[in-house]
Image (cartoon, coloured by chain):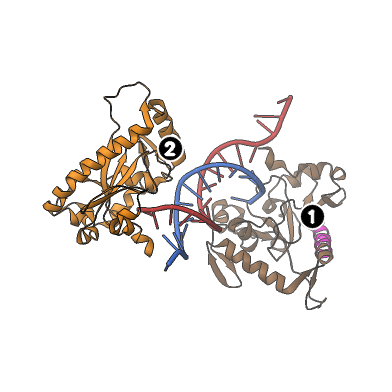
Chain colours: A orange, B brown, C blue, D red
Amino acid sequence: MSFKYALVPYIRAPEKHPSVVLYYDENVSIIKDAFPKGKVHLLILPRNEETSKKRSQEAFKDEKTRKLLEGYVNQGVELAHKAFNKTWKRIDGDEQKKMKIIVCCHSVPSLNNLHIHVLTTDMCGKNMKNKKHYNSFTTEFAIKFDEFPLKEDDYRLQDKGRCESLLKQDLVYNGINYKGSFKKMQAKLHDDFDKVYKHI
Amino acid sequence: MSFKYALVPYIRAPEKHPSVVLYYDENVSIIKDAFPKGKVHLLILPRNEETSKKRSQEAFKDEKTRKLLEGYVNQGVELAHKAFNKTWKRIDGDEQKKMKIIVCCHSVPSLNNLHIHVLTTDMCGKNMKNKKHYNSFTTEFAIKFDEFPLKEDDYRLQDKGRCESLLKQDLVYNGINYKGSFKKMQAKLHDDFDKVYKHI
DNA sequence: TATTCCGATAGTGAC
DNA sequence: GTCACTATCGGAATGAG
């Protein structure tokens, strides 16, 4: 099952992966997601071993941990904006309007090391390929960083099955239900993106 | 919907299709199935217009029609054996053992002209590609020619839905249930065939 | 159950 | 929900002056 530990190298030895690691210090590594689901998609990896092996729901019950990460989250968002603006420009030239960023953790992660997703909301990354990818960022499956700590009765603390069922929900974009047709929705997503942004 | 009439040319003008038509007279055309599901796969097509447009269940209520076709069925089986033996030979050399032949009509045909399938039981034709193909010849979905006329209470006279559900049954070969895995079953079918027969 | 094309769905294996 | 591969399953079109 070693794939579950794919993030370990960036936590243990970030200095060895300069092409992937955007920033690191003793507390975190911030890396580019190898399979981006948005035009920009970063991961913040806490380097503390105890923190890293917890699920987000547990790790962020602790206020000190949350407070520590808060600053890095702001930094991650800043890095994401910079990366996005380096490649994309609004066609209307309005530089006040900033691309929105999602900061979240998956309620059922597949990789064993705690990671905070920081990604643009376009959902147009090269590796956005199916319904589960999409729903994992657009439904409650994604726990927003500012939702932590979860209330004690939040189903996402315990009910893995219910969380996973969110990934099978009908696709919804702009209030339109695309049912099973991921491809059609994706075409619309790309269309809409291309109407607003141009490649630099 | 013209695909439903794909067989019409062979009924109307068999003389124009010598590469497909093995035999014809005023009553029938016997042709090679364009998408063979067995190593040899023929179709017997009654040329009488009234007969041709009936389902087998109805057409073969009539004894005269059955008796007329009986002879052609025997001829079709003979032709199938000849065609098979022209290409395949038993490895054990036992020429007494003859390849078994299925003679049947589908309880829910997709083509509008009545056609009797005559095919070897190997289920190893080039166009045996999925579960429905297989089940259409190995379950009660296939009405054997000698089952006609059907008893009045046979569900296949009326219950199209139940007939169609037979096509979705689990795959069974040699008492083994292959569930959804058509490819694995097919590999076994080909294996077993190749153990007994060699190409001439 | 005619085929073919496309796409969604499902299971697996990955060291 | 890591990906990538294979295969299964599911719908729609097929014609054409």
Rendered position, B141 above or below A185? below
Q: Nearer the viewer, residue B144 or B38?
A: B38
Left or right position of B80 against A46: right
Between A52 and C5, the one lying in front of the other is: A52
Determine which residue is flagged by label 1: B64
Q: Distance between the residues labelled 2 and 1?
A: 61 Å
Amino acid marked by disc 2: Gln
**Residue B10 appears in the rendering:** yes
Magenta-colored stretch includes residue B65? yes
Q: Chain letter of disc 1? A: B
- Residue sitting nearer the eye, A166 or B7: A166
Secondary-structure class at tag 2: helix
Magenta stretch, residue numbers: B64-82
Please tell me how crowded label 1 is: few (under 14), some (14-19), or many (20+) other residues with Cα within 10 Å.
Answer: few
Question: Where in the figure is residue D1, as x and y percent of width and height?
Answer: 35, 53
Would you name the residue on which mark 2 appears? A186
Q: Is residue A68 shown in magenta?
A: no
**Callout 1: helix, strand or loop?**
helix
What chain does badge 2 belong to?
A
- Badge 2 crowding class, 10 Å Cα cut-off, few under 14, some 14 to 19, many 20 or more, is many
Residue A111 visible, this orientation: no
Q: Quadrant of residue D6?
A: bottom right
Instruction: Give the numbered dot on residue B144.
Output: none
